Image (cartoon, rainbow, N blue to C red):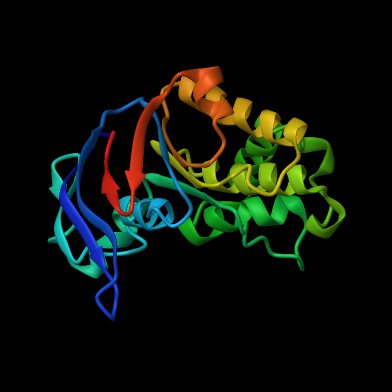
Amino acid sequence: MMIEASNLTKRYPGGFEAVKDASFQIDAGQMVLITGHSGAGKTTLVKLISTIERPTSGSLVVNGQNLSAIGRSAMPHVRRHFGLVFQDQKLLFDRNALENVLLPLQIAGLPRRDAIRRAQAALDKVGLLAREKANPIALSGGEQQRLAIARAVVNRPTVLIADEPTGNLDADSGAAILEIFADFHRVGVTVVVATHDQSWIERYHPNVLRLDHGRVVQ
């Protein structure tokens, strides 16, 4: 799935431009890191790419479809191609790990037996199958992040998008999360990550989109 932005701008009320005239291309199967100083616009750019935010101006084209021009009713169909992981995982603490991962499949209407099988496969992929009955509150920070990843990939997205997925983790837990993302990239998933963590660059040599005060400088 190719993602192409041209002069993408996001202006918030009051006139603040979090992203300014950003133009870039992300090819299918690439691993791309969005980096930059605090406040550079990384989170806003991630939200624009994942269609959580709509641009003020410019175009965002995904697989030949200009998302800036389509109606809100068409957005759910587009979003099915994306798996989203955020620093605040938004896990449901009144449900166990398996039930958290099942939720997107239930919304999609998958039969429960098939949904459980797929959810267990996603948990196994991130090393949490043995904890499927555990409540998220009983999981470590790294395990909670892995649970969020399992939920993001259970619908088999073609693009995995994350915002600071290792920001609250210790070095060992962060390294484990990096390797999970790398594994998905190796099997052809497009991976887009906003991060301050330079070890991604040192270890995996991804393409880099560097932001400076909302502008793409690299």
State which quarter of the image contains the N terminus: top left
Above or below, 188 against 124 in this view is above
- Residue 134: x and y in percent read 84, 51
Q: Residue furthest bottom?
A: 14
Quadrant in the picture for residue 117? top right
| Residue found at x 70% / y 56% | 99
- Residue 169: x and y in percent read 72, 44
Q: 102 and 182: which one is in front?
A: 182
Badge count: 0
Q: 52 and 12: which one is in front?
A: 12
- Residue 146: x and y in percent read 68, 41
Left of 77 or right of it: where is 99?
right
| Residue found at x 60% / y 43% | 149
Above or below, 133 against 174 in this view is below
Above or below, 26 against 70 in this view is above
Quadrant in the picture for residue 189? top left
Left of 190 or right of it: where is 169?
right
| Residue found at x 55% / y 43% | 154
